[in-house]
Amino acid sequence: MIKAILCGAAGRMGREIINAIEGASDIKIIAGVEEKSNPFVNRFISSVKIVDDIQKVITEADCVIDFTNPGATMENLRNSARFKKPYCIGTTGFTPEQIAEIKKFSQEFPIFFSPNMSMGINVLYNLVEKVTQDLSEYDIEIIETHHRGKKDAPSGTAQAIGERIKKVKPDAKLIYGRQGMTGEREKKEICISAIRGGDVVGEHRILFLGQGEFIELRHFATSRRCFAEGTLKAIRFIVKKKKGFYTMSDLLG
């Protein structure tokens, strides 16, 4: 039985992960972690007791799951680093400096990092690379849509898609939205547009636009369950690994 701590247990994804793990026979959440001001601290969500400090429960765990925000994730990592527990991060919105610090921690213990835990979206990354290579002269645009409560934009997934395109086209120039007299579209330009509204769990569209035709790759998350199921796979993967920085590419092989 894998004993896990869930940081961000009271959030949308935290609750979805709790529900998913309740149906798993090999993983158990032994505690949830939230900031001190959260009303669920010292209470239960389902059968999970919520505490306000990861250090209170870290010694009992086999791994940590973190779906919070960049600041909270970094604090949790720093507070638990000396215990060297495998760490699974699904938080989005990190700065390059924070990602560099996460990678430094991974030199001491295994860290699984994915801004999107969906199996489907990670297969989409590979499709994006393939189509970018095959249609190298086509213009590329990225559009992402999320619920009105999402705090970061563009999504970590949209940015990851952009980076996959840059692997194939290193001179590609990522921009974010357009306004005013922008002039003709530059050939190397790839625009990421973010839409926020309603209760959309997540949608990502990648348009490859040529002369007289265009191709669209599209992924819909119809519920957060796909992210929770991917997280369970990530937990089972990371607890078996030695120190290092791992992503969905490693899990999928």
Image: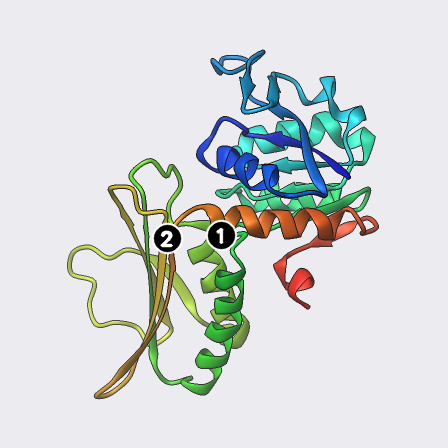
Where does the image place residue 142, in percent across and percent down from the top left? 35, 63
- Identify the residue shown where x is 28% and y is 84%: 210
Quadrant hosting residue 65: top right
Quadrant hosting residue 108: top right
- Circle 1 SS class: helix
Asked whether the viewer can see residue 91, the reply is yes
Where does the image place residue 118, in percent across and percent down from the top left? 51, 55
Q: Quadrant of the C terminus?
A: bottom right
Q: Which mark is residue 222?
A: 2
Query: Do callouts 2 and 1 mark residues in contact (Cβ within 8 Å)?
Result: yes
- Circle 2 SS class: loop
Where does the image place residue 79, in percent across and percent down from the top left? 71, 25
Is 21 above or below relative to 128?
above
Badge 1 density bin: few <14, some 14–19, many ≥20, Cα 10 Å? some
- Name the amino acid, label 2: Thr
- Name the amino acid, label 1: Cys
Of residue 16 and residue 79, the one placed in the foreground of this image is 16
- Direction from residue 53 to residue 166 in the image, left or right: left
Q: Which mark is residue 198?
A: none
Is 243 above or below relative to 1?
below
Of residue 177 and residue 215, the one placed in the foreground of this image is 215
- Direction from residue 128 to residue 20 in the image, left or right: right
- Direction from residue 197 to residue 122 in the image, left or right: right
- Direction from residue 182 to residue 138 in the image, left or right: right
Query: Label 2 vs label 1: CA separation?
Result: 8 Å
Q: Which mark is residue 226?
A: 1
Asked whether the viewer can see residue 69, the reply is no
- Identify the residue shown where x is 82% and y is 30%: 83
- Identify the residue shown where x is 52% and y is 76%: 168
Where does the image place residue 43, in percent across and percent down from the top left? 55, 13
Badge 2 density bin: few <14, some 14–19, many ≥20, Cα 10 Å? few
- Identify the residue shown where x is 57% and y is 52%: 230
